[in-house]
């Protein structure tokens, strides 16, 4: 059996496998995605705070440049701020989550390339980098579904922070 379409909604035909799949409303979908983002950010927060607990706020991460170590340490504060925003101001939280993960991946790839060449082999053998890249891809791919939209008086959907 096939699915039909009414307006812009896909409707499962009687007897199709899709008939029993629940319809998830956009607000619920957004909440689920923001919760996944938050769980991942809390894992990163734990890692950053564990490093601070073990080595202190001014740890040089084994001799890396001060700008890099300051960035990594700052994530111990920025990541939980994003978690709070994901639920208090969802769109601001999503924007901050994107900024965090994109800047972190770019920064860490540059560090990998400069200090641990060749880059592709290093990336392939670094589970944390693979996890970060996967999380970045997930956030970027699902951002349109997570982004909360407000309906204006005219019925037009507007993006809002």
Image: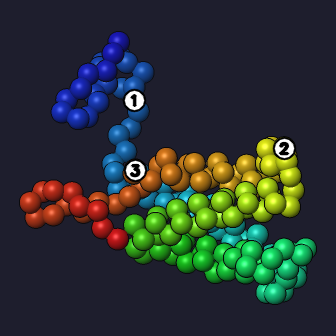
Depth-wise, is mark 2 or mark 3 nearer the camera? 2
| Residue 88 numbered tag | none
Near-viewer residue (110 or 90)? 110
Q: Secondary structure at mark 3?
A: helix
Task: Of the two numbered discs 2 and 3 on the same chain, state the one appearing first in sequence.
Answer: 2
Task: Of the two numbered discs 3 and 1 on the same chain, state the one appearing first in sequence.
Answer: 1
CA separation in Å, label 2 and label 3: 34 Å
The extreme right residue here reads 62
User: Mark 1 packing: few (<14 Cα in 10 Å), some, or many (20+)?
Assistant: few
Near-viewer residue (151 or 68)? 68
Q: Which residue is mark 3?
A: 145
Q: How is the image coloured?
A: rainbow
Q: Is 132 positioned to the left or the right of 69 in the image?
A: left
The extreme top residue here reads 1
Q: Is 130 positioned to the left or the right of 95 in the image?
A: right
Q: Which residue is mark 2?
A: 121
Identify which residue is drawn at 87% across, 56% down.
Answer: 116
Identify which residue is drawn at 41% across, 33% down.
Answer: 21
CA separation in Å, label 3 and label 1: 22 Å
Identify which residue is drawn at 31% across, 24% down.
Answer: 12
CA separation in Å, label 2 and label 1: 44 Å
Q: Quadrant of the C terminus?
A: bottom left
**Could you tell me if residue 23 is visible in this image?**
yes
Q: Which residue is mark 1?
A: 20
Task: Of the two numbered discs 2 and 1 on the same chain, state the one appearing first in sequence.
Answer: 1
């Amino acid at each position: 059996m096939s699915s039909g379409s009414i307006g812009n909604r896909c409707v499962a035909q009687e007897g199709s496998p899709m008939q029993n799949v629940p319809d998830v409303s956009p607000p619920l979908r957004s909440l689920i995605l923001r919760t996944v983002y938050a769980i991942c950010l809390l894992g990163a927060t734990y890692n950053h705070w564990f490093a601070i607990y073990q080595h202190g706020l001014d740890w040089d991460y084994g001799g890396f440049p001060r700008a890099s170590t300051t960035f990594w340490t700052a994530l111990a504060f920025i990541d939980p701020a994003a978690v709070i925003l994901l639920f208090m101001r969802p769109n601001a939280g999503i924007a901050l989550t994107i900024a965090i993960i994109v800047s972190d991946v770019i920064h860490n790839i540059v560090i990998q390339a400069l200090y641990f060449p060749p880059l592709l082999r290093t990336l392939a053998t670094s589970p944390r980098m693979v996890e970060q890249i996967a999380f970045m891809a997930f956030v970027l791919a699902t951002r349109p579904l997570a982004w909360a939209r407000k309906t204006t008086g005219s019925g037009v959907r507007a993006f809002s922070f």
